[in-house]
Image (spheres, rainbow, N blue to C red):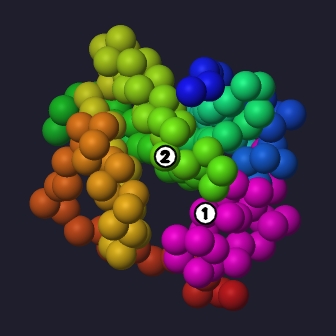
Amino acid sequence: MSEITVRVATPADAEFLVRGNAAMALETEGISLDLDRLRDGVHAVFERPARGVYYVAEVDGRRAGMMMVTYEWSDWRNGDFWWIQSVYVEKEFRGQGVFAALYRNVEGLAQTNSGVVGLRLYVEHENGRAQATYERVGMAKTVYEMFEVDFVLRRA
């Protein structure tokens, strides 16, 4: 098996991140994202690091997967939850440990940061394959349901 490396993404990875996000949205939810809006959103993370950070997994020097982490303050725990978002693994690299490498990287960083109280992510209800993957790395379903008002899609 090839070696998987994980690194912090740079603006040079932006188009890979845009393509990955667009592919993930289409594949998991049947949503075609506005690529200009998405591209602006990806660049906004690089422009203001307090919004989050992207990680890229590489296999033999080729970009194979991506993950973004954003932050949510928890007054109950007096610390930050790191939210895992924008997860995508290129089809040809699935089943080879790319997600696990991304996750272990983020988990390790979180565990060494005393201000981080846990990791969270949300997953589309019908995406059983992803849910099984998350359980394999040690995550557990919570008692919470998610609600939202999406102003962008409502305006579209």
In the rendered image, is residue 61 in sight?
Answer: yes
- Check disc 1 and report its element: helix, strand or loop: helix
Q: Residue furthest left?
A: 143
Query: For the point 76% across and 54% down, which residue is it?
Result: 18
Amino acid type at image mark 2: Gly
Residue drawn 59% across the image and 71% down it: 27
Which image quadrant for residue 127? bottom left
Instruction: Please name the residue shown 53% across and 76% down the image.
Output: 29
Q: Residues within 10 Å of mark 2 (few under 14, many from 20)?
A: few
Would you name the residue on which mark 1 appears? 24
Q: CA distance from mark 2 to mark 1?
A: 16 Å
Q: Position of residue 118 (x, y in %)?
A: 28, 33
The residue closer to the viewer here, 29 or 115, is 29
Q: Nearer the viewer, mark 2 or mark 1?
A: 2
Identify the disc placed on residue 83.
Answer: none
Chief secondary structure of the magenta span? Answer: helix
Instruction: Give, as a three-letter code, the residue at label 1.
Output: Met
Question: Looking at the rendering, which quadrant does residue 24 occupy?
Answer: bottom right
Residue 38 position (above or below residue 124): above
Q: Residues within 10 Å of mark 1 (few under 14, many from 20)?
A: many
Above or below, comparing residue 156 to residue 59 in the picture = below
| Residue 123 point in image, percent of width and height | 39, 62
> In what quadrant of the picture does the C terminus appear?
bottom right
Question: Which residues fall within the magenta stretch?
Answer: 19-43
Label 2 sits on a secondary structure element that is loop
Q: Which residue is mark 2?
A: 95
Question: Is residue 103 positioned above or below 112 on the image?
Answer: below
Quarter of the image containing the N terminus?
top right
| Figure check: 28 above or below 53 | below
Residue 19 placement (x, y as % from top left):
76, 57
Asked if residue 27 lies left or right of residue 134, the reply is right
Does 25 appear in magenta?
Answer: yes
